[in-house]
């Protein structure tokens, strides 16, 4: 056998695969134009490595068959969405200025529901002490989902509390992302499963971290307890989220604890993800739930989700429309701020209209390319009058937008292509002045621990940073 022929043959095979991948990107996959060009450049300039990168990071998911909802549940939900769409919002109602935003969110399947109580959690100890207390008080059912779930002191505290509840006969289901929580092993849950607990990993792979779906991760963080208590926000599970990592320092994040009918919405999306994490279709929970307590507060809220199986970028559209409703102020906190052209245009239009735009980002990178792309984006908005702050005492991981002190979004979504197109994400949008003002005041209190990034400071950045920004901007559509 002439082994000298093997290398040329392999080269031709890889080049052919590159061509096939390029054709698929151009003609069969619905992508943002900038992302399409970015992938074509990778395939062109890195013909061998580029194809492997595409296999790991570039393939799209099928939309039609990904989620399965029981027929009765699907029909009931469609009927409720249709009924809400036909309900006119009175001109004098507080929700009237946001009727179009509410309707646009319904296109993603987001019902307008209510919370009877909302508590803002912005410190790791505060969040997990509260969550653990609720878990220990559970009577019937706990559903918990995280992108990152570590076996460290915090993770062990949480898992041990869940394991104990399973022993008591509480129905406990744990869902984690296979890449974000790649260190978790089946043996970690052996006794838990013997006690009746259930656990699944999202998009798992027999090769562990070498996952062909590494680019489409479930980034959601939520918990529902007895269909009465719900959690949604930015905190994952690990000691760094308590501020115990020397590299990151204090960890500043935002989570919500909610009560009331909104919890059923959180559970609906958990059920979808739980079902999608298995090759077998499973029955949705029918566990009897204790009756809800009578409450007088009625806080309008929508749970908006988006992901690689969505028809469009619902969460990006929601955030842009929020910006367009602004008359006075917009407050944005995000660890990654790499908007596409449409989001940047919305920000520039708001600034040109006299709206105050304040953005807060971390002062240290956890992903270098992402950080310098963020720096480039905020640097451009500074030129248009935005106020940009870098959080100095730790890591800013909150993902919030507050508009006019009247509406607010809190969830898992970063301002980047990964959150808008590639990951499964979830945000709560609250149409409530009290909550919005609380989040606005929280932003302003964080300003005391931040530095203002002025035009002069940005213009004086070293050449090396300018070079990093230039490279990162080119890669931003696929970061």
Image: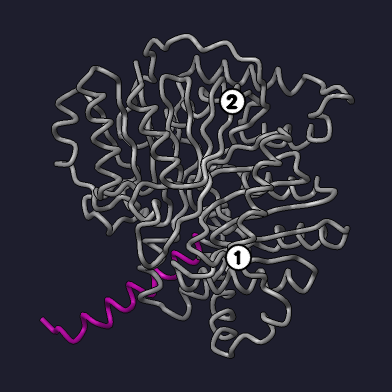
Q: Is residue 357 left or right of residue 412?
A: right
Residue 132 falls in which quadrant of the image?
top left
Q: Nearer the viewer, mark 2 or mark 1?
A: 1
Determine whether the residue tagged by mark 1 lies in a helix, strand or loop.
strand
The correct choice, above or below, for 332 with respect to 76 in the image is below
Is residue 7 on the magenta stretch?
A: yes
Q: Which residue is mark 2?
A: 117
- Which percent across, then down, holds residue 380? 71, 73
Magenta span of residues: 1-24
Is residue 77 on the magenta stretch?
A: no
Characterize the local packing of mark 1: few (<14), some (14-19) or many (20 or more) Cα atoms within 10 angstroms.
many
Q: Residue at x 63, y 26 (%)?
A: 111
Q: Which residue is mark 1?
A: 450
> Magenta part mainly helix, strand or loop?
helix
Decide which of 408, 249 is in the foreground and name it: 249
Decide which of 346, 394 is in the foreground and name it: 394
The correct choice, above or below, for 340 with respect to 261 in the image is below
Decide which of 126, 417 is in the foreground and name it: 126
Q: Residue at x 35, y 68 (%)?
A: 52
Q: Residue at x 47, y 52 (%)?
A: 60
């Amino acid at each position: 056998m002439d082994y000298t022929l093997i290398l040329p043959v392999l080269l031709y095979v890889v080049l052919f695969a590159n061509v096939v991948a390029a054709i698929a990107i151009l003609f069969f996959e619905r992508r943002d134009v900038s992302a399409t060009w970015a992938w074509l450049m990778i395939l062109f300039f890195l013909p061998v490595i580029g194809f492997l990168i595409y296999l790991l990071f570039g393939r799209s998911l099928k939309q039609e068959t990904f989620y399965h909802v029981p027929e009765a549940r699907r029909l009931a939900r469609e009927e409720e969405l249709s009924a809400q769409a036909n309900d006119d919002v009175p001109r004098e109602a507080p929700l009237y200025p946001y009727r179009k935003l509410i309707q646009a969110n319904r296109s993603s399947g987001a019902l307008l529901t209510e919370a009877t109580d909302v508590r803002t959690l912005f410190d790791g100890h505060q969040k997990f002490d509260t969550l653990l207390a609720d878990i220990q008080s559970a009577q019937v059912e706990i559903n918990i989902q995280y992108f990152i779930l570590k076996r460290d002191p915090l993770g062990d505290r949480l898992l041990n509390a869940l394991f104990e509840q399973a022993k008591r006969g509480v129905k406990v289901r744990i869902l984690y992302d296979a890449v974000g929580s790649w260190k978790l092993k089946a043996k970690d849950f052996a006794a838990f499963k013997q006690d009746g607990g259930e656990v699944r990993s999202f998009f798992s792979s027999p090769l562990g971290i070498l996952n062909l779906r590494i680019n489409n991760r479930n980034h959601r963080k939520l918990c529902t307890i007895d269909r009465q208590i719900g959690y949604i926000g930015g905190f994952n599970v690990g000691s760094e989220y308590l501020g115990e990592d020397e590299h990151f320092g204090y960890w500043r994040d935002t989570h919500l604890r909610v009560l009331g009918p909104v919890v059923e919405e959180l559970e609906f999306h958990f059920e979808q993800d739980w079902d999608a994490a298995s090759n077998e279709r499973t029955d949705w929970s029918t566990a009897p739930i204790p009756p809800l307590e009578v409450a007088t507060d009625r806080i309008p809220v929508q749970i908006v989700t988006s992901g690689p199986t969505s028809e469009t970028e619902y969460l990006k559209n929601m955030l842009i429309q929020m910006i367009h409703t602004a008359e006075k102020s917009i407050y944005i906190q995000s660890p990654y701020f790499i908007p596409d052209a449409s989001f940047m245009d919305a920000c520039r239009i708001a600034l040109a209209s006299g709206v105050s735009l304040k953005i807060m980002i971390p002062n240290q990178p956890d992903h270098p390319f992402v950080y310098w792309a963020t720096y480039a984006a905020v640097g451009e908005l500074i030129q248009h009058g935005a106020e940009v702050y870098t959080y100095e005492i730790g890591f800013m991981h909150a993902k919030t937008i507050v508009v006019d002190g009247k509406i607010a979004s809190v969830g898992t979504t970063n301002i980047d292509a990964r959150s808008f197109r590639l990951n499964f994400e979830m945000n709560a949008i609250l149409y409530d002045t009290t909550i919005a003002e609380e989040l606005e005041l929280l932003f302003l209190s964080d300003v005391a621990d931040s530095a203002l990034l002025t035009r002069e400071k940005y213009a004086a950045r070293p050449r090396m940073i300018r070079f990093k920004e230039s490279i990162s901007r080119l890669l931003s559509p696929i970061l």
